[in-house]
Amino acid sequence: MKYVAGERPEGCVFCLAPDADDDEANLIAFRGTHNYVILNAYPYNSGHVLVVPYDHLSDVTDLSEPQACEMFWLARMCVKAMQRCMRPEGVNIGMNVGHAAGAGIEDHIHLHIVPRWSGDTNFMSTIGETRVVPQSLDECSRNLAPALASVIEAEKASRTGNEATSDPHSVSEA
Ligand SMILES: [Zn+2]
């Protein structure tokens, strides 16, 4: 792992955002154990969020197993939250690792989750352009952050419920 505790580089927005004490101003929608969810300040589309590890990692292969698992779990929760409050017709999930792959901030990896609707611009052609989005970031943030919190709460509750069942195969289908 390249990042050593206490040696976060100066000026990395993905390190600075969670360190600051104002999640709303920094567009942070949710804080997990290893990763946080942040609304993209330069969205490709309305509701575009990023899942970002707290650790300053530039290579996806440096993610630990728990970091990687939580990253994709949070991506799934983001999609659920979007389905609840934005009703997208599709979703792009992806990562640009390295300059050649088109990474905007190549020193600190991040997973993009972009809700899509029929008729909006093709994902690839939108990369690199700042677009005028129909819904303001603030409004999006207001809708998505609580939706994400409630989706995650429900997911955790159902998980606890599953653990309470000693043998999941014994559940009757009546
Ligand atoms: Zn960083």
Image (spheres, rainbow, N blue to C red):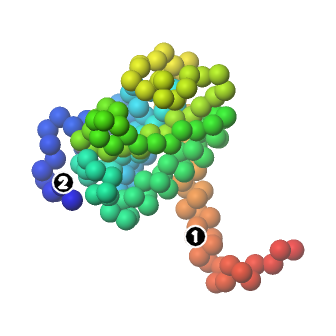
Question: Identity of the amino acid at label 2?
Answer: Tyr
Q: Count neighbours of disc 1 (C-alpha within 10 A) and say few if under 14, some if 14 to 19, many if 20 or more.
A: few
- Outermost residue, right side: 174
Q: Quadrant of residue 40?
A: top left
Residue drawn at point x = 47 percent, y = 24 percent:
126
For the residues labelled 2 and 1, the Cα–Cα distance comes to: 34 Å
Q: Position of residue 54 (x, y in %)?
A: 29, 50
Disc 2 to disc 1: CB gap under 8 Å: no
Q: Quadrant of the N terminus?
A: bottom left
Q: In this view, does 72 lie above or below 91?
A: below
What residue does disc 1 label? 160
What residue does disc 2 label? 3
Residue drawn at point x = 58 percent, y = 59 percent:
155
- Outermost residue, front side: 100
Label 2 within 8 A of ligand 1 by Cβ: yes
Q: Is residue 1 above or below residue 122?
A: below
Q: Where is residue 111 in the image (x, y as percent from the top left)?
A: 41, 44
Q: Position of residue 76 (x, y in %)?
A: 54, 51
Q: Position of residue 85 (x, y in %)?
A: 62, 36
Question: Identity of the amino acid at label 1?
Answer: Thr
Q: Count neighbours of disc 2 (C-alpha within 10 A) and say few if under 14, some if 14 to 19, many if 20 or more.
A: some
